[in-house]
Image: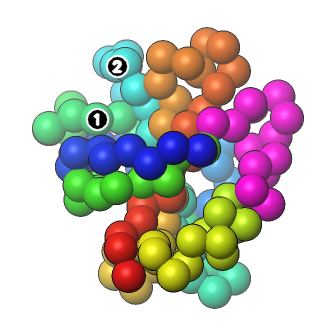
Amino acid sequence: MRIKKISTLNLVGLFGDGNKTSELWNSFEKMHLNKTKNSYEVRFYQEESCDCFVGVEEENPINADLMTLTIPESEYAVFDVVAVNGYDSENDNMDKWLSDNRAVYRQREINGKKYVVEIFGDRFNEGIVEICIPIERV
């Protein structure tokens, strides 16, 4: 785990049900032909529901069916997840870190929803996904 500042992300992509992530990625990949360095999955949590945004960083959507999402600059608690172990494999470590550090940090929200940013970047070819939890000082 490391703490990292990430600048504002201007993303284009698709919103959908967090329980149907693979279908969402399949739909997005059919609509978006421009391959960029990083792909992003942003998951929004509220009580028992989860919404998901999948996309790439771009200023302007190429396809009118794509939506935009701006994630504000923030500090993040970044966890490297080995994809073959499952994306949930670090959940206990993430929850423990948030609990152990709750006197110093709290998880940021957008529109009353907690969120995480998954980055499929250079290390994705090695099977590593960065899961970034936005944090702010208490």
Looking at the picture, does residue 89 appear above or below residue 98? above
Identity of the residue drawn at 35% across and 34% down: 56
Q: In this orientation, which residue lies closer to the viewer: 119 or 4?
A: 4
Q: Residues within 10 Å of mark 1 (few under 14, many from 20)?
A: some
Which portion, as a residue range, is magenta?
80-93
Q: In this orientation, which residue lies closer to the viewer: 27 or 100?
A: 100
Residue under label 1: 57
90 sits to left or right of 97 = right
For marks 1 and 2, the one nearer the N-term is 2
- The answer to whether one can see residue 30 in this image is no
**Numbered tag placed on residue 36 in the rendering:** 2
- In the rendered image, residue 87 lying in the magenta stretch gets the answer yes
Which quadrant holds the N terminus?
Answer: top right
Q: Which amino acid does the dot numbered 2 rest on? A: Thr
2 sits to left or right of 82 = left
In this view, the residue farthest toward the left is 60
Q: How crowded is mark 2: few (under 14 residues within 10 Å), some or many (20 or more)?
A: few
57 sits to left or right of 37 = left
In this view, the residue farthest toward the top is 125
- In the rendered image, residue 7 lying in the magenta stretch gets the answer no
Provide residue 138's location: percent of width, then percent of height.
Answer: 38, 82
Say whether marks 1 and 2 touch (CB < 8 Å). yes
Identity of the residue drawn at 49% across and 37% down: 119
Provide residue 118's location: percent of width, then percent of height.
Answer: 52, 44
For numbered disc 2, what is the local secondary structure? loop
Cα distance between the residues tagged 1 and 2: 8 Å
Q: Which amino acid does the dot numbered 1 rest on? A: Glu
Provide residue 5's location: percent of width, then percent of height.
Answer: 31, 47
Looking at the picture, does residue 125 appear above or below residue 16? above
Identity of the residue drawn at 69% across and 21% down: 127
